[in-house]
Amino acid sequence: MPPSDRIRDHAGQGATTVAAHRARRRLRADQARQLADLLRHQLLTGGFPDGTLPHESTLAADYRASRNTVRQALDLLRAEGLVERLPGVGTVVVAQKYPHGLDRLMGLAETLLEHGRVTNEVRTMGPAPAPTPVAERLHIPPGTDVLYIERLRRLNALPLSLDLTYIPLDIGTDLLGADLENTDVFRLLETITGQHLGHAEITLEAVNADAHSAAVLEAPRGTAVLMLERLTHLADGRPVDLEFIRFRGDRITMGGLLHRSL
């Protein structure tokens, strides 16, 4: 075989070896991600009541995975701030996510009642002209004053969400003297209007935190946050509360019960 052919043949074998190595790495990365998803569920649902994960070899046996895959999965959970490796102890749970239901219309304090105390820091509050998109959602003329509220909400003193709220002023005026630091707006709206809240339209997406939101939430700049947009209506159908809520994604998990209807 001519030298040039031998070089090309060797290069081809090398390319095959590199491709196979990359394929194995991709496969292990996929398996690690899948294992991290399973372990994350256990972390968030109390699957490790003593706060310590089993040894890597035990996890490898339980999930029929290699030790390298287990280590990579734990690295993913460590990067999320859920676990940490302690010398002489092992991998321990260091963070907790709190469940926020999506199948019932409730205020944050009602939703997280069993997990601790929710407090609200009112950062901004007062009348402001409604931007056109806000006015359209609240069924009021553009430029009409609404009550604008920005609140930092904490659970057990830890920053949890930054809420921007728009409320029609004929209702919002009565909120100006209310105890917003310790009371959900939902409860106050029902008291002021004499009606129960009826339903809400929601949109949930992940967005990158801007510099202001990150600073207020004490989160790294650019980190992903869960953004919940919610338009709440009274029982008679009137829209009364438009909110843009940025949750720290490392402290909240969203869930609900869905029924299939054909």
Image: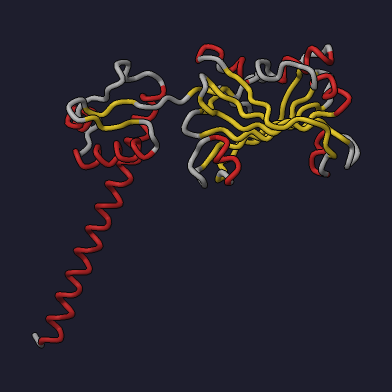
Q: Is 62 in front, or is 149?
A: 149
184 to the left or right of 205: right
Residue lying at 41% horizontally and 20% vertically, measured from the top left: 45
Residue lying at 76% horizontally and 19% vertically, measured from the top left: 198
193 to the left or right of 87: right
Question: What is the x, y in percent for residue 63?
Answer: 25, 31
89 to the left or right of 6: right
Q: Residue furthest left?
A: 1
Q: Is residue 26 above or below residue 68?
A: below
What colour-coding does the image apply? secondary structure
Question: What is the x, y in percent for residue 196?
Answer: 77, 14
In the picture, the quarter occupied by the N terminus is bottom left
Residue lying at 84% horizontally and 25% vertically, measured from the top left: 238
Question: What is the x, y in percent for residue 84?
Answer: 30, 32
In the picture, the quarter occupied by the C terminus is top right
Question: What is the x, y in percent for residue 22?
Answer: 26, 58
109 to the left or right of 124: left
Q: Quarter of the image holding residue 260?
A: top right
Q: Quarter of the image holding residue 129?
A: top right
